[in-house]
Image (spheres, grey):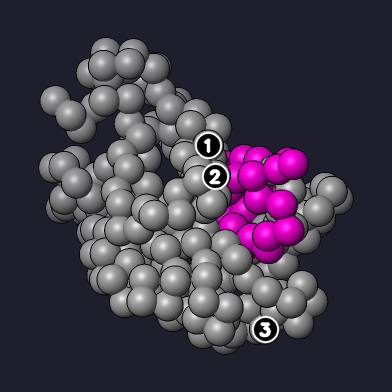
Amino acid sequence: MGRLDNKVAIVTGGASGIGEYMVDLFSKEGATVIAADINQEALERASQKENVHGLKLDVSNEEDWKQLLQDVKERFGRIDILVNNAGISSEKPMKDVTMDDWQKLSAINGFGTFLGLKHVFPYMEEQKSGAIVNISSYTAQIGMGVNPYAASKGSVRAISKAAAVQFGRSGIRVNTLFPGVIETPMTKGLQSSQAAVEQLIAMTPLKRLGQPADIANAALFLVSDEASYISGAELTIDGGYSAQ
């Protein structure tokens, strides 16, 4: 028996990085998983996995969301789980940030999460059940530089709290994860500087960078029935960095 037997899950950004680990783990635990991603080549690889279906999704496009959810509902009959994981990063200092930078980060990280919440709600409300996990960032909790990435992830934190209150009345749980620096393709630029990596590790109480599995395992717990009375929670996964 798997922890997600007979459940249908959607993971955005599910064809690479943290999202791919979630897709693989959820599938292993018995779920039918939709890896929703904008990378067509990665989606084709994802679709070769057992119980995994790669579907194209630009999270910042409202029509894409409507079509994806309609297709999943028609094909699988229900939607039990949504993980709003897709995102992009930026390390630009404040003096170099442009309006385009701000709008792009906000559209994908912030508005993309909002659209997922908005359009999955009617399906889960009809079922009177559902579990949603939104991926924010520890930069939304502490002063890690003034940039559009932190701002966009701060919006994820705020909308998650509001959704937990509103959606809870329909039996839908909404929780948020706040990863620290995780070794994925998205953080490759940071990892290219050995000095920067060593400094980060030295400043982290657990003395290592995070791994995609650290986030995937936490998401698995929150979307499983084991967390049936948990909603509106914020779980920081950064090796103790933000506790200092």
- For the residues labelled 2 and 1, the Cα–Cα distance comes to 5 Å
Left or right, residue 14 beside residue 132: right
- Nearest the viewer among 199 and 223 is 223
Q: Which residue is mark 3?
A: 70
Three-letter amino acid code at disc 3?
Gln
Three-letter amino acid code at disc 2?
Leu
The answer to whether mark 2 and mark 1 are in CB contact below 8 A is: yes
Q: Which residue is mark 1?
A: 217
Left or right, residue 115 beside residue 141: right
For label 3, the crowd category at 10 Å Cα-Cα, with few meaning under 14, some 14 to 19 and many 20 or more, is some
Residue 77 location (% of width, % of height): 74, 77
For label 3, the SS is helix
- Which residue is at a point 37% across and 47% down the rendered structure image? 177
- Which residue is at a point 30% across and 52% down the rendered structure image? 233
Residue 141 location (% of width, % of height): 19, 46
Residue 9 location (% of width, % of height): 64, 60
Q: Which residue is mark 2?
A: 220
Can see residue 114? no
For label 2, the SS is helix
Q: Is residue 194 above or below residue 151?
A: above
